[in-house]
Amino acid sequence: MTVCSLCTRVIPDTIPPPIDGLCTTCHDNAQRRILFESFKVCKLCNAHIADQYNQETRSAYEAYIEDGLCPTCRKNPPPPNKINTNPTQGEQRTPKDIEILTQYCLTQTTEFFTDQYETTCLYMNKQCTKQGDACYTCENNPDPEHIPNNACTWHYIQPTQNKDFKHWLSHLMYDYEEKFVSSENITTVVSILSGKCLSQGKRHNLANRIAYKDNHIWLDMADEFWRTIKISRENWEIVKHSPILFRRYKHQKALVTPVKPKTLTEAREYANKLFNHLNISEEHRLIFLCTTISYLIPNIPHPILVTHGPQGSAKSTLFKLIRRLVDPSKIELLTLPHKIDEIAQQLDHHCVAFYDNLNYLSQEVSDTFCRAVTGAGFSKRELYTNDDDIIFNIKRCIGFNGINQVAEKGDLLDRSILVELTPIEQRKTESEVDAAFEKDQAQILGGMLTILSEAIRLYDTVQVVNYQRLADFHRWGCAITEALGFSSEDFTKTYNTKVDNQVDETLNNDNVGLTFLSYFTKYFKENGKNSNWEGTPTELLNTLKTEAENLLRIPTNQKAVWPQEVKSFGKRFTPLFPALNKKGFCIRQNKGGLRLIFICLGTQTKLSSYTSSHLGVLGVSGMSCGTFSGRGEEYNIERVEEKLPEVTPNTPDMPTFSFVDSKGRQPTCCFCGGLIEDWHWVEGPLSFENPAHEVCYRLEVEKKQQGAVV
């Protein structure tokens, strides 16, 4: 057994010891110190020998001692006019701190690169640190295959403009040269390295905590050894040296090392242990677990998790425990800033952003979170610059909690999952809750990873009939549900119920929507389901205003409560169309001539006999560039010149059809998008491809005829 004469470290037998009796690390450090202390220059080209010594073997330096030439001049001597005529003066040259510090950085850098925002970064080597006689990092390395007391190296990513990088440079200079370096010299070194990244480096897209590459999902464990978890359709594993994928932030904490279950059944048991620590009722558990596991899937829109309930319902505890599972942080719960750019920075730095104890969201903040769910870019001017931007490209997992249901806007509710919590019956101390969860945390995460791996395998075979708003989440939710041992219909049924409840929340939170439901529910009950309402926007506003004042006792004279003009009424009424369509109302507006609004029920008589050529003549709303968006079939609008089909009045003896397509989907009106259940056969060939409400079809015919007369 051979021991290094400097660090007393055992030199493995597989590595032949150098002739100087030092281990590889100490020998390289000693040679590097000798090199920089002498800092010799070539007697022909006057080039620093250190510039080329990093690219050659140790024998190159030994050869220099004999002939005084650098490796390049030894192979290809320069022309006479390039030869240094004063080698003695060159040999006496003392290197500057900038040169020494730059060379030290180059010896520890594996690759120079930039990220997707042109941020300059170094891919650096890190060796085990010695504290006393023990190697701290070796003894604390969680890798079971790691052998303590042997040199270990791993890689990490270091942005060059980071303040910590400048501190590291100061430490590096003092550690090797035992001297201080000025801030101006450090700034110069940073500029040199940044320029090398921009001019010679590759481009790598860096992600926050979760990434997708090479058909695998990668999860950053955020520990000091830069380990990652690779999730594939076969299984998952912990990888010691991952590709260049992730950026790190100061608030991030390391994931717990997951425990791999032996079977899929055991994985389901592990995952369901989560509900031993959360106050979630049985009706919410399936969609809640699917949502939590989906947080490990990158590049898809995730629904906003909105929990609400009275005091003492463990709303904050729920968010804290979920955060510890998938995205541990020193800041587990966030406070909502007042400025939009500060919200964007929070969302950029946190993969899972949970906001605690919210009471109200303004329209601007609500729109910001809507964009952050489906993906959006934000930018702001960089400080002390005129035209440089700080760019954020965000698609995040978001959650709110509060005593009241804080998501009130229709577009935000359309992207949310509402979970109502009840007060807990038996309270525990925070230390008891943390200790119990920490005991099961590794198994819960391991079970979630195994279920996600199975969901990746099942994803291509999942069949979804009618997608909801977040279609990617809907499909992944069905795949995760099947991996949990249920059917995809179970998830779809639960998700549809959630969406229906959110439609009710949208209408009940808006005075115009609440009044519309109150009035037209009675209107169609009195006049029959096959009737319709027709009038101008002013007439509709006055009708609803009367209903609001007389029956609902809404103070319509207040601008914040009720729209005072037709223009403001339209801004309040138009966003309610999707929710009203789901409640069975069909609403259409014509754009030319006298502005009229047509309202009917989605279950009344429908027409569906017009052919594709008729669609071309009518100029169907929803067609773009000659393509009908509802079915993806192409029609030529300009060349078709057939006669407009006449609308035949419906008679009782005409057959009525109820129809769904081959995938079980209920058809929708090609004009307004509302659901239809039955329709009558009108003259011409029967077609189920392009059904429409009668009032929508009549409106398009009248509009086309008016255009022909003009």
Image (spheres, grey):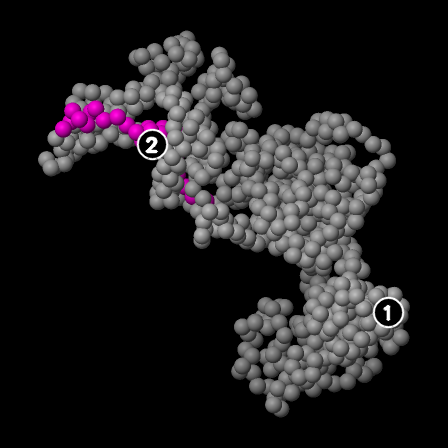
401 or 634: nearer the viewer: 401
382 or 229: nearer the viewer: 382
Q: Mark 1 points at which residue?
A: 549
Q: Taking 91 as reference, is 644 left or right?
A: right
- Cα distance between the residues tagged 2 and 1: 78 Å
Q: Taking 230 as reference, is 468 left or right?
A: right
Report which quarter residue 576 is drawn in. Answer: bottom right
Residue range highlighted in magenta: 86-115
| Amino acid type shown at disc 1 | Glu
**Residue 461 in view in this figure:** no
**Residue 122 in view in this figure:** yes
Compared with 142, 23 (above or below) is: above
Residue drawn at x 76%, y 41% is 315
Q: Within the magenta stretch, is there residue 111?
A: yes
Q: Extreme left residue here? A: 80
Q: Position of residue 31 (x, y in %)?
A: 31, 20
Q: Mark 2 points at which residue?
A: 98
What SS does tag 2 mark?
helix
